[in-house]
Image (cartoon, grey):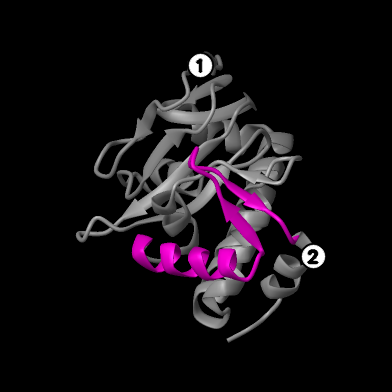
């Protein structure tokens, strides 16, 4: 069977898929990041994972293997470039291309490990530890976090009001500073790293 691979590109902010939509194909990223989120009926949003070059989107994998529709939303967090393997070609590519199959299945196993970590963080880790981890992960080289309180709530599987309260407490302790521009400056990264290891 002749393989058909299409060039794929999307601008930052583009919605790549939404709940209930069928999957058009398997995206192989060469650059960029896709953020996959789940929203509840209350409007609360949780970041499930991010897809970067060499990684698999579990939502897409499940759709292609089981013929289901998407259950979450995928957004281009940055400009994206890559290729797309049409849905009709994905199964045969898995069967015929050993290197591709090993790469996909290895990435699926890694992603499940990340899911387990997410569950452990929510169930077993104190909220301040989750917030500290997210702040450290999202900080740039200058120690600035460019994220809204709503975005941090999605990253920590919590509510925006609670994030605001805990950030206010972090600021009172001199760990961070909330800038008028909307960014958050990390002032004591070592202390945040210690907090990030705390359990409930």
Residue 9 badge: 1
Does residue 192 sit above or below 200 in this rendering? above
Q: Can residue 184 be spotted in the picture?
A: yes
Which residue is pictured at 60% across the width and 54% down the height? 177
Tell me if label 1 and label 2 are in contact, CB under 8 Å.
no
Displayed quadrant of residue 94: top right
Residue 156 badge: none
Displayed quadrant of residue 104: top right
Asked if residue 164 lies left or right of residue 114, the reply is: left
Residue 38 image position (x, y, % from top left): 36, 53
Pointer 1 or 2: first along the chain: 1
User: How packed is label 1: few (under 14 Cα within 10 Å), some, or many (20 or more)?
Assistant: some
Magenta-drawn stretch contains 199: no
Residue on which disc 2 sits: 190
Q: Can residue 87 be spotted in the picture?
A: no
Residue 89 image position (x, y, % from top left): 48, 26
Secondary structure of residue under mark 1: strand
Displayed quadrant of residue 200: bottom right
Which residue is pictured at 41% across the width and 39% down the height? 74
Determine the CA span between mark 1 and mark 2.
39 Å
Does residue 91 sit above or below 171 in this rendering? above
Q: Which residues are magenta?
A: 160-188
Residue 190 image position (x, y, % from top left): 79, 65
């Amino acid at each position: 069977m002749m393989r058909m691979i299409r060039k794929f590109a999307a601008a930052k902010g583009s919605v790549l898929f939404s709940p209930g939509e069928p999957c058009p194909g398997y995206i192989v990223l060469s650059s960029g990041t896709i953020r996959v989120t789940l929203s509840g009926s209350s409007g609360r949003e949780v970041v499930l994972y991010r897809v970067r070059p060499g990684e698999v989107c579990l939502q897409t994998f499940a759709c292609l293997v089981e013929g289901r529709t998407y259950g979450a939303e995928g957004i281009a967090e940055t400009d994206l470039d890559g290729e797309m393997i049409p849905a009709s070609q994905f199964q045969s590519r898995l069967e015929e291309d050993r290197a591709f199959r090993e790469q996909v299945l290895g990435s699926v196993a890694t992603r499940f490990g990340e899911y387990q970590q997410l569950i452990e963080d929510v169930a077993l880790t104190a909220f301040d530890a989750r917030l500290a981890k997210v702040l450290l992960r999202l900080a740039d080289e200058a120690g600035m976090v460019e994220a809204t309180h709503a975005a941090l709530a999605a990253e920590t599987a919590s509510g925006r009001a609670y994030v605001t309260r805990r950030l206010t407490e972090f600021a009172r302790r001199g760990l961070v500073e909330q800038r008028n521009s909307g960014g958050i400056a990390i002032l004591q990264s070592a202390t945040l790293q210690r907090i990030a290891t705390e359990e409930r």
